[in-house]
Amino acid sequence: MTPSSEYNFAYLDEQTKRMIRRAILKGLAIPGYQVPFASREMPMPYGWGTGGVQVSAAVLTPDDRFKVIDQGADDTTNAVSIRTFFERTAGVATTTATPVATVIQTRHRIPEEPLTEGQVLVYQVPIPEPLRFLEPRESETRKMHSLEEYGLMHVKLYEDISRHGHIATSYAYPVKVEARYVMDPSPIPKFDNPKLGDCPAIQLFGAGREQRIYALPPYTQVVSLDFEDHPFEASKADHPCGLCGADDSYLDEVIVDDTGGRMFVCSDTDYCEGRQAAGHRGKDLGGKDAA
Amino acid sequence: MYVAVKGGERAIENAHAWLAEERRGDISVAELSVAQIREQLGLAVNRVMAEGSLYDPDLAALAIKQARGDLIEAIFLIRAYRTTLPRFGASAPVDTGDMACDRRISATFKDLPGGQVLGPTFDYTHRLLDFKLAAEGETPDAPRRDAEPGPVPHVTDFLNREGLIEEALHDDTTPPDLTREPLEMPADRALRLQALTRADEGFTLSMAYSTQRGYARNHAFVGELRIGTVPVEMEIPELGFAIEIGEITLTECETVNQFKGSETEPPQFTRGYGLVFGQTERKAISMALVDRALRWEELGEDNVGAPAQDAEFVLYHADNIQATGFLEHIKLPHYVDFQSELELVRKLRREVEASQEQHREAAE
């Protein structure tokens, strides 16, 4: 597909891209800090990845290979829609293979395959403020960040433990970046949290509606909030994948009949297909990897 | 057996094809033209221009057609288009005192220079369905006469002369631009007015209504409501002077609000202001009431904790394109997050059941 000539490369005009790149650079210079940026109306709705799309548009170059995932999968409808958007407006090569992608836009997952230097992972972020549901006012939460006043967050986590015996946050689990800013990792399952830190790739977070960009440069220290006696624990369904047999990947639960039958499959479709291509078989494909 | 779903792309294409077919409706019925929408659904066009922040009746009409009459969807189309347009410059501020008024009413004075002009209004119509319209009857021509010569001064200027209303000081500072800079709090009045003029009509109406019902009541009178055309002038650097580049229709509402005075202000009336593209008077009046409510701090009033006084609440929730996008995004798949919640709830339930079991055994 050739890029549409009606729009600039990757849709946004150069001035806007420059403004976004400045916000990205500032974000990289202050890891975990939310940089306000003048988010534009995009031709897809707010809440559907406009922040991620603007960040991708600002970092894409004609030589990039672009991958888009939603819930870990390349073929979910919104991932298809965003990939098609950049095929049309930027004419960049696209791929579903994590290792060969140079820019990966994601919603709600980090790929299973470890990322490498030179890759950029762009997150779509709905609510960038980790303190938002504790304090609805932006003017207050910005003050709390600048004063490094995160007591409220620890109280919330502690109340979870006293009420439920566990921290009752299973996704969008807050992290502390380089011992300074508390950051929302976007609604990834907490299973993915350990992949945020010490990552060789650049991680960029775009929140379009909320007009914020933040970033993690490569090899940043990222720690999930916890207590000494209640350490953070990455969790997933206690099964291997029914298709590829992987026991180290995040799983989706699929209801297969109306009598309670279900199976568990990798949410990262590229990872799962790669394993199947390499000969791994889960129990639902009659494989011997079945646990 | 479950197989990973492929073919999202084809499903999307087919859905869009079906949408296009539904938009057209029964093909034995004549297709609606953009010109028909522009001419006969003018108030819908006005709303789309106002909330889309783009004054172009033809594009607004096209957007309404494309959106199947869903005005928020049409506003979205206009906003997405608007953001791609290059900026040549800024016009000179329009002078609403110079307006060629189609409508101009004051609720505070029985008569006044420039007169009361009802104009094309629904006011005083009896809301009875007109079945003649269903029969496609032509409407008779309205009687005509020339406009009164002479200026139509702003009502608030009369009050101002007596010092009875707060002075609206002339200010040449360049206002912030909501469409080019992120909205940051606290927002000054110019920024708040910018956000309100493109705010959702329904939201603005309800916020204004809440002040009338006692949530930060500010006793608003419509000092003046005027609708008409104003020339738009732009300074052309090569020429060195401003030339008229066109005209636009605006609705302006100035409210006169009761005010007892405070520690810092003598007793005098205060102002609320609304200015909106097109004939959009419900929106302009609502805007003026909300503007006035948001001014509590600068006027030294109490914050009674009313929603309409809360600038963060009002400004962060007034934009229907932001609101509808985020609201509707919950249609997107969330199964990764839901799965993690499932695991957590199952774990918590197992633990509760185990502890209940223990209690039972201990009791036996």
Image: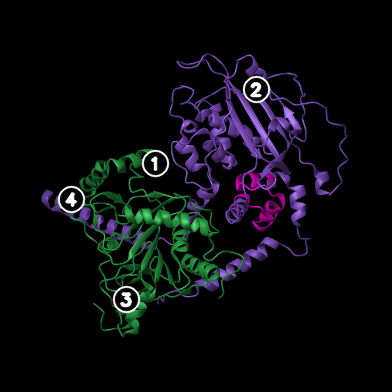
Name the kind of residue labelled 1 in the image: Glu
Tag on residue B156?
2
Q: Which residue type carries mark 3?
A: Gly
Mark 4 or mark 3, earlier in chain: 4
Residue depicted at 28% across the width and 49% down the height: A181
Tell me, yes or no, if residue B86 can be seen here.
yes
- The residue range painted magenta reads B46-73
**Is A211 on the left-hand or right-hand side of A151?**
right
Query: B287 or B130: which is nearer to us?
Result: B287
Q: CA distance from mark 4 to mark 3?
A: 35 Å
Q: Residue at x 33, y 45 (%)?
A: A131
Position of residue B344 measured from the top left corner of the image (x, y, whole percent): 28, 57
Residue type, label 2: Thr
Disc 1 is placed on an element classified as helix
Q: Colour of chain A?
A: green
- Residue A138's disc is 1
